[in-house]
Image: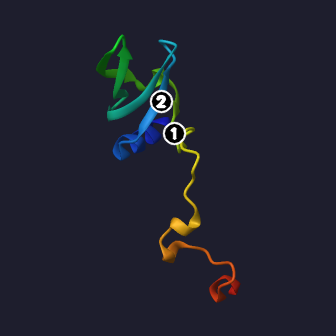
Amino acid sequence: MLHRKIYQICTEGREVSLFLRDQQRWIEEATIVSLEGDLVTIRYETEEDDEISSWEEMVRLESIGSLSQKLASVSRYNSEIPIADECPHEEQIHPHSPESNQE
């Protein structure tokens, strides 16, 4: 099951966070580059003392204890959320229109 999910994430190119059981550490914002047999290749960046490093690591599928994906995020600083009037007219919901009363 995990093998299929990792393959799906790899083909879609989404960012994930991985927990490596054998090293007891999280890798944040990683991209799964390839999946060959039981080897998973991941790429990620780290930042230390004003230096950004890019890493590519190969880990065994069995060492991945957890995998998570960010579904959405909202800025704390920009409190203005887009409202329905800003959507294209075709996508707006009009509660009093004749289409909304049809079932």
Q: Quadrant of residue 42?
A: top left
Residue at position x 47%, y 12% in the image: 23
User: Relative to residue 30, is residue 99 drawn left or right?
Assistant: right
Q: Which residue is mark 1?
A: 70
Q: Quadrant of residue 92?
A: bottom right
Q: Residues within 10 Å of mark 1 (few under 14, many from 20)?
A: few
Between 66 and 28, the residue placed more toward the observer is 28
**Residue type, label 1:** Lys
Whole-percent x, y for residue 1 in the image: 51, 39
User: Relative to residue 62, is residue 57 drawn left or right?
Assistant: left
Image disc number at residue 51 = none
Secondary element at image label 1: loop
**Residue type, label 2:** Ser
Whole-percent x, y for residue 100 in the image: 66, 82
Q: Residues within 10 Å of mark 2 (few under 14, many from 20)?
A: some
Q: Quick one: quadrant of the C terminus?
A: bottom right
Residue at position x 46%, y 20% in the image: 63
Residue at position x 63%, y 78% in the image: 94
Q: CA distance from mark 2 to mark 1?
A: 8 Å
Q: Quadrant of residue 48?
A: top left
| In contact (CB < 8 Å): disc 2 and disc 1 | yes
Between 2 and 98, the residue placed more toward the observer is 98
Image disc number at residue 17 = 2
Whole-percent x, y for residue 2 in the image: 49, 36
Q: Is residue 38 above or below residue 74?
A: above
